[in-house]
Amino acid sequence: MRRTYLTTMIALFITKAAVAQVPARDHDGLEDIVGTWQSDTAHGVSALSTCHRSPQQRAVICEQTISTPQGVRYAVNVFLVDSARRRYAYYGISRPGDDAPAVPLQIVGHVWTYGGLGKAEDSLYHRTVNDFSAGDAYVWRQESSPDAVHWTVQRRGRAVRLRD
């Protein structure tokens, strides 16, 4: 029942017909990720992501098909903006029923930084940086730091826009 509900809700959010009926919002920083993206393979993992505006244009919802050496898995990512305060949040849902805590998202120009504000269980700070400056491609990197000042790249890759 939960899976059916989640699937139905996601389908409602990303229906292109519903999105087309609502006029586009002013620039809010989220449009960089709208489209279909194919990432290169990094550490045996690649992802196909399709990202659309929500029907009321207040969020971007991305469905991902992630190919790993262990098999294919799916995820849903939601990006929200509080326009009045220019604050962003990211929610990643890997499995139905899992908790999806808000991850702080900072957008400066075309560079998105997820997380990095609090220590994880391993006593390190972790963040992901996506740079959309190229337009039809973006580079990403996952970093860690003992002090949230000096960052070490753990993984990096690139994604190419297949279509808008």
Image: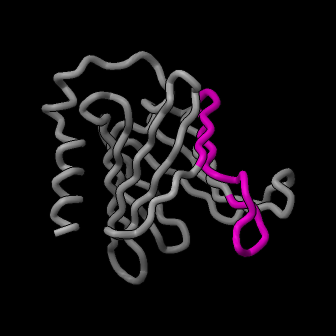
**Lateral position of residue 18 relative to residue 135, left or right:** left
Residue 125 is a magenta residue: yes
Residue 100 is a magenta residue: no
**Lateral position of residue 115 relative to residue 64, left or right:** right
* x, y percent for residue 59: 38, 36
Please tell me whether residue 160 is drawn above or below residue 132 in the rendered image.
below
Q: Quadrant of residue 95?
A: bottom left
Please tell me whether residue 15 is drawn above or below residue 159 in the rendered image.
above
**Residue at the (36%, 62%) spot, across then down:** 75
User: Magenta residues: mostly which secondary structure?
Assistant: strand
**Lateral position of residue 121 relative to residue 137, left or right:** right
**Residue at the (42%, 30%) spot, across then down:** 31
Please tell me whether residue 44 is drawn above or below residue 109 in the rendered image.
below
Colour setup of the view: one colour
**Residue at the (64%, 30%) spot, across then down:** 108
* x, y percent for residue 97: 34, 69
The magenta span reads 104-126
Image quarter where the C terminus lies is: top left
**Residue at the (77%, 67%) spot, across then down:** 124
Decide which of 160, 97 is in the foreground and name it: 97
